[in-house]
Image: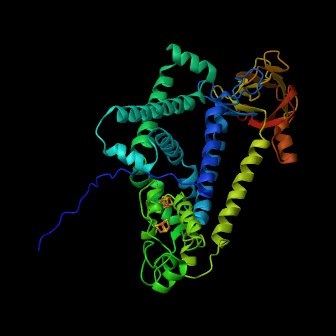
Amino acid sequence: MSEQTPELYQKRIHIHPRSVKGRFRNLKTGILALAYIVFFLLPWLRWDRPNAPDQAVLYDLPGRHFYIFGLTIQVQDIFWLAGVLIIFAILLFFVTGLAGRVWCGYFCFQTLWTDLYMMVEQWIQGDRPARMRLDKSSWNREKLMKRGGTYAAWLFIAFWSGLTFTMYWVDAPTLVVDFLLGRAPYAAYFTTLFLTTTTFVMAGLAREQVCTYMCPYARFQSAMFDHDTLIISYDPKRGEGTKGRAKLGKGLKTYEERQKAGVGDCIDCGYCVQVCPVGIDIRDGLQYQCISCALCIDACDIIMDNQKWPRGLISYTSEHALQGHKTTLLKPKTFGYGVILTAATGLLIWSIVTRSPYTGTVEQIRQPLYTQMSDGSIRNTYEIKLNNKLTAPMTVGIRIQGLPGAVLDMDGMDHIDLAPQQRIKLLARVQIPPIQEDHEGKEDHEEKEDHEGKNDRDEVTFIIEALAGTTAEPIRREVPFYVPEGD
Ligand code: SF4
Ligand code: SF4
C-alpha cells in the first residue's frame, strides 16, 4: 500500500469572475460608490475651526489632536477610541450572528478594492471569456497594451488610495503640493509607498487568497454562527430533484418535462460558479471561502427569470430553514448583543456630549511638605495643570475654600488666560496664619477637631471655574494641606 504525502501547497488557479447584474450587485456597487466618495473626498472637506486646522477630519499626531468635524479629541480622551473599537467588535458579533459574513461581502476594504480592480480589469480587458482568451494568448501588442493599461490603472488607484490615507494625517492640499515637489515628510512618502504596494498586491494580485488564507476573521467567524444565521445557500432539494441536476436538453426543457423526469431546477449552466469572486461552487454546500457577496444569487435569479421559474434556487437562508424548521432571528443572544451595543453606544455619546471644555488638576508639592514662615504662618505649595480643550481662548479663575484664614497666592494672578488648546502648569501657594495655642497648650484646630470631629487644616479645596470663553461646571479638587506634626 503506497502512502501519499499530503500536499501542503496548493497551486493557485487564476479566477476570471464573470460580470453579473442584479439587486445584490446593485447594492454592492452602491456601497462601493458611497465608501469611495467618503474615503477619497473627506480629506478635502474643510471645517471652520478658529485657531486650529480647517480640515474636517484630521489626525494631527504632532499636535496630538484628532479633529472629527466639530469634535476635537485630545490624547487623554483616547479612551473614546477604545470605546469605538469595542462598539465595532460588538457590532461585528451582532451582525455576523444575525446575517453571517455581510462585512466580508459588502464592506471589507479587501472586498471594496478588489471589486474596483475587477471593474477596471473588465473595462480594459473585457468580460470573462475575453480575459481568459487574453490569458492564454501569447504576448503580442494587444496583450501588452491591455495588461499594461490594467496595471497602470491599478497602480494609479493604489497610489491615490495610499496618498489619500496619508492626507488624513496632514493637511490635504499642502500634502499633495509638498509630495509632488519632494518636500513632504519622509513618513508621508513611506506610508504612501507602503499602502500603494499593499493595495496593488492585495487587490490586484492576491485577491481571494487574502480572504482564503490570510484573513483571521474568516477563520473565527464560525464561532459567531448558529443554525439561524443567514447564509447563502443552494437549495439542493429543488436543484437536484430525485435524479440530480441536468442541463437543458431534449425532453428536459420545460418545467413539466423536468418534473416528470425527476431532475431538479438547476440546469447546470455554471453561471453561479463563473461569477463567484473566490471561485467556489455554492452547490457543494457552505464553504469557508465564501465571502457572502450574494453574486451567485443574482446569477441564478437571472437564469430562473429566463426559464420563467421561481427565483430562490440560491438564496439567503439558514441551516434551520434548509432543514425545514423556522428561522428565529430574535433570540436571547441577539437581544443581549443589542442591549450591550445600545448601552455602549449610549455611554460613548453621553461621554462625548458631556465632556468638559477644559481640565484642571492640582497636586501638592511634597518637597518640602510645608514651609513654616518666620512669623509662624504655614505654607503649602501646589502644582496646577490647566488644559484648554477648545479651539478658542478662554479665561479661568482659581479660588480655594475649606481652610479658614487661608490665602491663595499665584504670583499675583487672579485669573489665567488660556490660548486655544493651550496646556499650562503653574505654581500656587496656600498660606494659613500662625496657629494659636490655648491655655492647655492645645492648638486651635485640635480643639475644633475634638468638637466637630474633623480637622479643617487637613485639606483644602481648589475651585477652578471658567470666567470667559465657555461655560461649564466648576472643577473641584480636594488636596491635603500639611502642618507641622505636634506643633
Ligand atoms: S459562493 Fe456566492 S456568495 Fe459565496 S463568494 Fe461565491 S458568489 Fe459570493
Ligand atoms: S446559476 Fe443556478 S441554475 Fe445555473 S448552475 Fe448555478 S444553481 Fe444551477
Task: In the rendered view, tell whether residue 305 sits above or below residue 357.
Answer: below
Q: Position of residue 339 (x, y in %)?
A: 70, 63
Residue drawn at point x = 56 percent, y = 72 percent: 318
Q: Position of residue 210 (x, y in %)?
A: 42, 49
Q: Quadrant of the N terminus?
A: bottom left
In the image, taking residue 149 as reference, residue 49 lies left or right, namely right
Q: Quick one: 216 or 325, which is closer to the camera?
A: 325
Asked if one can make out residue 303 in the rendered structure from this viewpoint, the answer is: yes
In the image, taking residue 4 as reference, residue 330 lies left or right, namely right
Asked if one can make out residue 195 in the rendered structure from this viewpoint, the answer is: no
- Asked which quadrant contains residue 35, the reply is top right
- Asked which quadrant contains residue 344, the reply is bottom right
Q: Quadrant of the C terminus?
A: top right
Q: Quick one: 185 or 358, which is closer to the camera?
A: 185
Task: In the rendered view, tell whether residue 324 sits above or below residue 371.
Answer: below
Q: Position of residue 233 (x, y in %)?
A: 52, 69
Farthest residue, direction left? 1
In the image, taking residue 211 as reference, residue 12 lies left or right, namely left
Residue drawn at point x = 79 percent, y = 42 percent: 353
Residue drawn at point x = 70 percent, y = 23 percent: 53
Q: Position of residue 79 (x, y in %)?
A: 64, 43
Farthest residue, direction front? 250
